[in-house]
Image: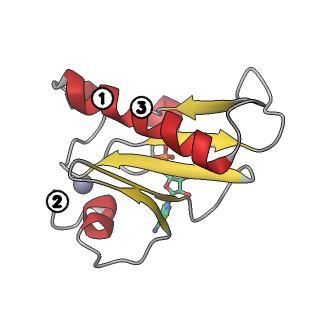
Amino acid sequence: MTDSCLFCRIVRKEIPATVVYEDEHSLAFRDIDPKAPTHVLIIPKKHVPSLNEADDPETIGRLLLVARSIAKDEGITADGYRTVLNTGANAGQTVFHIHVHLLGGRRLGWPPG
Ligand code: AMP
Ligand code: ZN
């Protein structure tokens, strides 16, 4: 539901966020509980609950291209970074508005927990 969806509310500026990028289709803001020196969430402005419901290749592709661009702005391109898209309970998805995590600025462990 877009009325109560946390990230839709951030898109509508009803809830504050530290926005690092915005255009017609996309919004990116800093994660409220960062897991790395750079931890940015990239979302489509349109409400899509998760990858399971995503049907538009442009929407999904744009998330990664915006993430790449923000990585450059954050100065983490050369050292490397991770883009993560959690889908559903086993992956730990907690907000059901699709988002890509951009994580960088430190060495990241693999495999993830
Ligand atoms: P996920 O677990 O993949 O669904 O990720 C949801 C992310 O949203 C978590 O990393 C949270 O820390 C983050 N988050 C939750 N509420 C907010 C908020 N108000 N502003 C920014 N990030 C948030
Ligand atoms: Zn939403």
Q: Nearer the viewer, residue 105 or 109?
A: 105
Task: Name the quarter showing ligand 2.
Answer: bottom left
How many tags in the picture? 3
**Which numbered circle lies on residue 76?**
none
Q: Which residue is mark 3?
A: 65
Left or right relative to 45: residue 108: right
Q: Which residue is mark 1?
A: 60
Regarding mark 1 in the picture, which secondary structure is present there?
helix
Quadrant of the image containing the N terminus: bottom left
For the point 22% across and 67% down, the residue is 4
Left or right relative to 85: residue 76: right
Regarding mark 2 in the picture, which secondary structure is present there?
loop
Left or right relative to 44: residue 111: right
In the rendered view, tell whether residue 8 sits above or below residue 63: below
Kindly report which numbered mark, 2 or 1, lies closer to the viewer in this rendering: 1
Can residue 87 be seen from the camera position used here?
no
Q: Earlier in the sequence, mark 2 or mark 3?
A: 2
| x and y, in percent, of residue 16 in the image | 41, 78
Q: Which residue is mark 2?
A: 2
For the point 28% across and 54% down, the residue is 23
- At label 2, which amino acid type do we have? Thr
| x and y, in percent, of residue 43 in the image | 35, 47
Q: Quadrant of residue 60?
A: top left
For the point 33% across and 64% down, the residue is 6
Q: Quadrant of residue 59?
A: top left
